[in-house]
Image (cartoon, grey):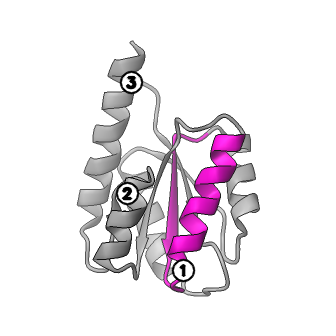
Amino acid sequence: MSRPIRVLVAKPGLDGHDRGAKVVAAALRDAGMEVIYTGLHQTPEMIASAAIQEDVDVVGLSILSGAHMTLFPRVQQLLREQGRDDVLLTGGGIIPKEDMAALETQGVGKLFGPGTSTADLVEYIKTWFAERQSQEA
């Protein structure tokens, strides 16, 4: 039996709306994942540090502020600098489709917009994790 998937859910920046992040965290927990929620107003440095300390498999950012083109690449850079380019960086929020595509070409995982079923996110993470586990075996 494989271990639980460890996910860090974070709200970077000044956006104070965390209902969606809490809904996602609960859905991931209900799906059997270990979830760490960092709370509001996190810097990319705080997020990356928590991800390293908690030894997570996935970092999910919830961004409604419009700063996604800065925040996702910065968290990704910080994780890579710590040798953790094996972490899936995913997330969601108010992100235009063209920006989602641009971030995905930079190595960010699939991003989810408003109205996405939490089941879709759960399935995406479980599929990614299973593929990673099979590559390591």
Instruction: Give the percent coordinates (x, y) of residue 73.
Output: 57, 61
Which label's residue is closer to the chain start, 3 or 1? Answer: 1
Which one is nearer the viewer's eye here, 25 or 70? 70
Q: Looking at the image, is mark 2 or mark 3 earlier in the sequence?
A: 2
Q: Quadrant of the N terminus?
A: top left
Taking the image as shown, residue 74 lies to the left or right of residue 100, namely right
Where is residue 43 shown, x and y percent of the image?
73, 69
Q: CA distance from mark 1 to mark 2?
A: 24 Å
User: Residue 18 bears which disc, if any?
Assistant: 1
Question: Which label lies toward us, 3 or 1?
Answer: 3
Left or right of 2 in this view: 42: right
Question: Which structural element holds mark 3?
Answer: helix
Say which quadrant the C terminus sits in.
top left
Q: Which residue is mark 3?
A: 133
The percent coordinates of residue 17 (x first, y second) are 55, 86
Q: Residue at (48%, 81%) from the top-left corner? A: 19
Q: Residue at x 71, y 70 (%)?
A: 42
The segment highlighted magenta reads: 56-81
Verify whether residue 136 appears in magenta. no
Is 65 drawn above or below residue 56 in the view shown?
below
Question: With respect to residue 103, does 5 lie above or below?
Answer: above
The amino acid type, in three-letter code, at marker 1 is Asp
**Image quadrant in which you'd find residue 11:** bottom right
